[in-house]
Image (spheres, rainbow, N blue to C red):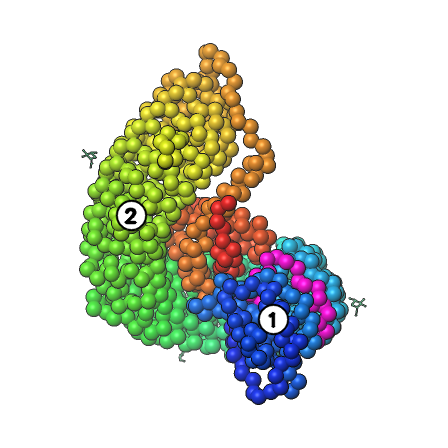
Amino acid sequence: MGASFATHMLLLIWFFTATFCLSFFKAEPHVSCNEKEKQALLTLKRGLTDPGNLLSSWSSDQEDCCRWERVRCDNKIGRVTELHLSSPLDADGLWFDYKKRLGGEISPSLLELGFLNYLNLSFNDFSLSHIPSFLGSMGNLRHLDLRDANFSRPIPHPLGNLSGLRYLDLRWNDFNRAPIPSFLGSMGNLRHLDLHGANFSGLIPHQLGNLSGLRYLDLSFNDFSGLIPHQLGNLSGLQYLDLGYNSDHLYADNLRWISQLSSIQYLGLSSIDLHKEVHWLQIMSKFPSLSDLHLSYCQLDNLNPSLGFINFTSLRVLDLSENHFNHEIPNWFSNLSTTLLQLDLMSSSLKGEIPESLGKLKHLEFLDLSSNSLNGPIPQSLGNLSEIQTLFLAQNQLNGTIPQSLGLLTNLEQLDISNNFLIGPVDEEHFTKLSKLRSLDISHTPLFFNVNSNWVPPFQLQYAGMSSSKIGPKFPTWLQTQKSLRLLLISDSGISDKVPDWFWNWISNIEVLDLSSNRIQGDVSDIVLNSTFLNLRSNHFKGHLPQLSANVQGLNIANNSLSGQISTFLCHTMNRKNKLEVLDASNNLLSGEFSHCCRYWQSLIHLNLGSNNLSGKIPYSMGSLVELQSLRLQNNSISGDIPSSLKMCSSLGLIDIVLSELRFLNLSQNHLTGKIPEKIGNMKVLESVDLLQNHLSGEIPPSMSNLTFLSQLNLSYNNLSGKIPSSTQLQSFDALSYTGNPQLCGDPLPKCTVEEKPPKRTPIGKTEDHFENSNFYMGMGVGFPVGFWAICGILFFKRTWRHAYFKFLDDIQDWVYVTTVPNVNWFLEKLKSHHLSLPPRTKFQFPALSPVMMEDKATFRLECKEACYLAKIIQGNGSKKS
Ligand SMILES: *[C@@H]1O[C@H](CO)[C@@H](O)[C@H](O)[C@H]1NC(C)=O
Ligand SMILES: *[C@@H]1O[C@H](CO)[C@@H](O)[C@H](O)[C@H]1NC(C)=O
Ligand SMILES: *[C@@H]1O[C@H](CO)[C@@H](O)[C@H](O)[C@H]1NC(C)=O
Ligand SMILES: *[C@@H]1O[C@H](CO)[C@@H](O)[C@H](O)[C@H]1NC(C)=O
Ligand SMILES: *[C@@H]1O[C@H](CO)[C@@H](O)[C@H](O)[C@H]1NC(C)=O
Ligand SMILES: *[C@@H]1O[C@H](CO)[C@@H](O)[C@H](O)[C@H]1NC(C)=O
Ligand SMILES: *[C@@H]1O[C@H](CO)[C@@H](O)[C@H](O)[C@H]1NC(C)=O
Ligand SMILES: *[C@@H]1O[C@H](CO)[C@@H](O)[C@H](O)[C@H]1NC(C)=O
């Protein structure tokens, strides 16, 4: 998978380079452009929306349309031959610029361009319209690139008339589960056909086997099913074939047809069940030019050559991750030493020790053995992998010390040995020559740092994961030399020291910081935090809550010794521009009343101020926290009513319709009085309500029966009375949810002695329910893509970084749980609604999703490329609340 990604990226980069060079191409003196064609281009421009002003040079003042940007002509006859209309790259140069996408209508005036042979409309947004059928009349077209232009089904039949077409790219559109139109099989000159991730389904038409000129065929990341047509074996010129990551029901009878693909260089069959192919190694090793082989998730269970020897002569990339080999790493990998660059054996149930012989793969740049059951030491011979850039050995049972030879790997950029039983010191020698190292993960190992306090490492890290290893008790001073860090995770790393003076300034460029569960001391009253996510939980910080720049999206500073009035923080002028989504300051000594400054905190999604010393009433202004999904104020001294409605003219109540996003409400162990507001029934997505140990009185409002998502309820130890309203919802809890209310009765408590009139229930129609629900998911999205993108952006073009990403999520488990779970749900929902293609076995879930998921790391192989891509779509399209 990784290699396929790399290849895609190379292609992509190549593509951009090519497009860019071409668009800046300045022609030599030539015949100037044809007036009719000029008018046609101007008409085309008028139909298009062009928010980025990409077509600003297209104007009637500019005499010669052959000199317009993105237009190329045949100089001899002055006729337009090429149009390069894809959106440009964005500022970071990694992806196209969503804000500059062309859209609108593609005018049939294009038909005037009778000599057009190259049309590129990629990375635009044609709002799920159809591909214009008049394109089928542009008989000279050789190259049609409609990649990621937001076209939808159906693909017009006339396109089949483009018999001269050689290059057709429809990747990343949304053809809404259409089958591949069989007329593609009659476009006999096609050399390049890319239908990757375009939401096609159904059978792969056998007619594709007629495209005898085809060199490149990518059908991956769709939802194809059924038998792979053996006619594909007729494509003897095929060099690139990817059928990976389709539905579970896409299968191959046998692989005999594959052996006819004598020119194949790239073969992707990931997620196709091949466990019956005992001779797969022999079959695959027959191709003289095979360089990339991707067999991830193929249910393979055998790595032993069944017929004596294998003969890969040019294999460069081998991805066998996510299989079930259940045996040791065989020695024959070292037979690939002259060619192999990448070997991915992640999560393949490998056992035993890492063989010394892997050290012979002298050209290897990428080795991933993580998430297996490998034991024993890291072999000294890995120090011979002088080209290695990425070495992932995480999540095994490796023991012993780290061989010093690893310090000689001059090209090493990423080292992950986390979650092993490795022991002993990590000292300066281990890094002697690692000047290119930018990602280091030693977390969850018994390793300890043993370096001089004045050590200046040869590297500049971007990612440092050292949680649950030992880098304390002194604050590691060498960190100060690291100027490029973006993620620093040193939770539970035995630091018991004062924060050094340089620290708060130094972290201001770090995006994600986790210092939790150490014994770090310091007064945070006067600091200004600037990181996107900070986890400072369970330390010895004191003083007032710190100030926040507009970059901070999440702050967990729970379980410290912070004191002072909560209103000082909420109303501080510096904090008024905050974009905070998550604040957990529970388990501190914060005091005082809530102020009316809630209106400055409208991005808050999760607020936890439980177990402090807060007093006074819940202000009406809390109703302005319209994004709030979880409100936890338990174990304080808050008194008064739960404000519920428009009691004051200008401010809305907490439980009014404005808080319709709330899912978790915990006000337990306070001094609340009055009734549970009837309007609680408006908070339709409530999942958890904890009001135990207050002084609430009156009846349980019948509207609570409307809370169909409610799965946790505790109303114990109040003064509630009367009959518990009957509904499947409220009766699904046991008596423990209602105990300590002597005057409360009815199922699940004992029967009431006086029968009361049946409760009024507000009926809710099914459709309305559904509607509410989808709104709910939409609403939650606000703010999420931004945060998600902040992390994913780093990972985007660096496939291997996703390991680090998952590690990162692992390390801040609960906290991220709070941050992401609802958003992930939303994201999943979004994915479903887009019907966008993901690898079928890629569970789109984050490690923090649930404890069960935590155990099965293998399911977290999220293809970040796809995910980020989707995140960008969502971000681009916006997801404002309706
Ligand atoms: C395409 O191939 C099928 C067999 O797969 C054959 O029956 C048919 O005649 C071919 N069509 C064309 C246009 O070559
Ligand atoms: C391995 O393959 C190459 C090229 O296909 C061939 O020349 C060579 O004879 C093969 N070696 C063996 C031992 O089969
Ligand atoms: C690996 O190479 C050795 C000698 O070069 C050969 O004897 C052995 O059969 C090869 N292993 C396989 C599995 O091809
Ligand atoms: C590593 O390389 C050195 C020199 O090239 C060689 O002497 C040594 O045997 C190799 N070690 C292993 C374990 O392959
Ligand atoms: C490493 O683990 C193996 C068993 O997996 C054990 O036999 C060996 O003694 C251990 N070595 C060290 C240095 O702990
Ligand atoms: C709070 O921090 C202390 C150490 O400072 C730790 O022992 C305790 O488990 C933490 N409690 C919570 C709920 O995190
Ligand atoms: C809690 O706040 C009250 C005033 O509201 C104060 O008297 C009391 O000392 C505070 N308790 C703690 C532990 O700070
Ligand atoms: C509600 O809280 C009380 C008091 O802490 C506890 O005894 C009871 O088990 C809780 N009920 C539920 C359903 O968690």
Answer left or right for 676 relative to 335. Answer: left
Q: Residue at x 26, y 62 (%)?
A: 506
Q: Is mark 2 within 8 Å of ligand 6?
A: no
633 vs 242: above or below: above
Residue 449 location, x and y as percent? Answer: 27, 62
Q: Secondary structure at mark 2?
A: loop
The residue singled out by tag 2 in the image is 557
Give the magenta-colored segment's residue range. Answer: 120-142
Which secondary structure class fits the magenta region best?
A: loop
Nearest the viewer among 658 and 399 is 658
Q: Residue at x 35, y 75 (%)?
A: 408
Residue 659 is marked as none
Can residue 99 be seen here? The reply is yes
Q: Determine the image quadrant of residue 297.
A: bottom right
Q: Determine the image quadrant of residue 665.
A: top left
Would you say residue 170 sits in the magenta stretch? no
Residue 781 location, x and y as percent? Answer: 47, 49
Answer few, some or many: residues within 10 Å of disc 1's Cα (few below 14, many 20 plus, some between 14 and 19).
some
Q: Secondary structure at mark 1?
A: helix
Residue type at tag 1: Leu
Answer left or right for 451 relative to 725. Answer: left
Would you say residue 127 sits in the magenta stretch? yes
Q: Residue at x 57, y 70 (%)?
A: 85
Can residue 1 be seen here? The reply is no
Identify the mark nearer the N-term, 2 or 1. Answer: 1
Residue type at tag 2: Ile
Nearest the viewer among 781 and 600 is 600
The residue singled out by tag 1 in the image is 42
Q: Residue furthest top?
A: 754
Residue 457 location, x and y as percent? Answer: 28, 70
C-alpha gap between disc 2 and disc 1? 59 Å
